[in-house]
Amino acid sequence: MTKPLEGIRVLDWTAWQQGPIAAALLADMGAEVIKIEPPEGEPGRGLLRMYGAELPLNFYYQNQNRGKKGIVLDLAKDKAREVLYKLVEKSDVFVTNYRESAAKRLKLDYETLKKYNPKLIYALSSSFGPKGPDANKMSADFAGQARGGIWSITQSEDLVPTPIGAGFADEVGGVMTAYGVLLAIIARERFGIGQRVDASLLGGQIEMGRLQFQMYFMMGIVPPGSVMAAARNPLYYVYQDRDGKWFAVAALQADRFWPQFCKVFGIEELEKDPKFENQTIRGQNFDELKPRLLEIIRSKPRNEWLKALDEAEIPAAPVNDFADLAVDPQVIANEYVVEIDDPIHGKVKVPGIPVKLSETPGKIERLANELGQHTEEVLMELCGYTWDDLAKLRDEGVY
């Protein structure tokens, strides 16, 4: 079955996570992605070794480089850049998350590459955006989360800024970059133009916090740092069961679901109590209701509560950890986890594709490339080099 991006060739000069994720998302949907690495490999390959871990599969590198071809070019050398320029002539997209100053120094910036291919889509996935005093600053995931406002609304109840796991800003920045590339591909199809695409850690985090940001602009209110500390709605809250497992009740229309909620938790006498009869009053008296609810909910396991809430048609969900998520029947049914049969490593489970297309679905074909695995293949097929040519390039340290 045809994939939506078949026939699109992407040159991927990226490292770590944000840029590589963008290219991996394009590969999932059928683009031919050629990852370009220095002879020693991009630094993401060595991340686990930095922390003293040696594993057969580097989950960090695998996560954002699946489905790609891999070549080695020492882009500090003029002849290596000549090879790259030949590849640019025959490609649709160039993705990078190296700083623009590095790209300019190596003559890999947009102004240079578009001379070789005026219809090239050049995507730069930066830290803080292409303009302003910090346009060329080096950064990382945590700094993107911190600066983008997200930590101000994910604080614990004692108001300590709380990261959303490792890689959240990188992942979102990669998604935003891929989104920009797709828009540019559509524009090229319609108008025949190439262009530069800019996305960033900062921009992605602002998008993730857009609702709260809009609230600030329109109401002049800085959102509460801790949702749980500020929560005053028993129907929009998280609860812990008798086994220490958590679940969320997520009924925004609190008054609509209040009678069913009272029945599920055995507090029918409170349904018409003047202190709890509507959400405004319930919020004012939540401190009185909360201890009783917590005690009731600690009397049974999570699955029983979730079943009762489901039968009452009250929106609710378990608070999954990743072990729970891996076996969640809804995750499996929608192929949000899939299995790759790798010739070396055997069957390997990976996160699936989150967007489904009925007629042109994507597919995860393979694990990440070995360092330089496809160098000769790509240079011979796309650039017309012979084995003799490749031998000379090797001798000159081009790859």
Image (cartoon, rainbow, N blue to C red):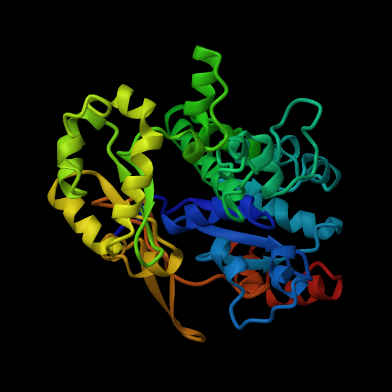
Q: Nearer the viewer, residue 219 or 386?
A: 219
Q: Nearer the viewer, residue 193 or 168?
A: 168
In the image, is residue 300 above or below residue 288? below
Q: Quadrant of the N terminus?
A: bottom left
Q: Nearer the viewer, residue 33 or 92?
A: 33
Which residue occupies 54% across, 18% down? 221
* Quadrant in the rendering for residue 84: bottom right
In this rendering, would 249 be left or right of 46?
left
Which residue occupies 22% across, 62% down? 304
Asked whether the viewer can see residue 117, the reply is: no
Q: Quadrant of the C terminus?
A: bottom right
In the image, is residue 73 above or below residue 207? below
* Quadrant in the rendering for residue 271: top left
Which residue occupies 50% across, 85% down? 345
* Residue 94 spot, x, y in % from top left: 62, 47
In this rendering, would 131 be left or right of 28?
right
In the image, is residue 229 above or below residue 218? below
In the image, is residue 360 above or below residue 61? above
* Residue 107 spot, x, y in % from top left: 81, 44
* Residue 225 spot, x, y in % from top left: 57, 34
Which residue occupies 25% across, 63% down? 303
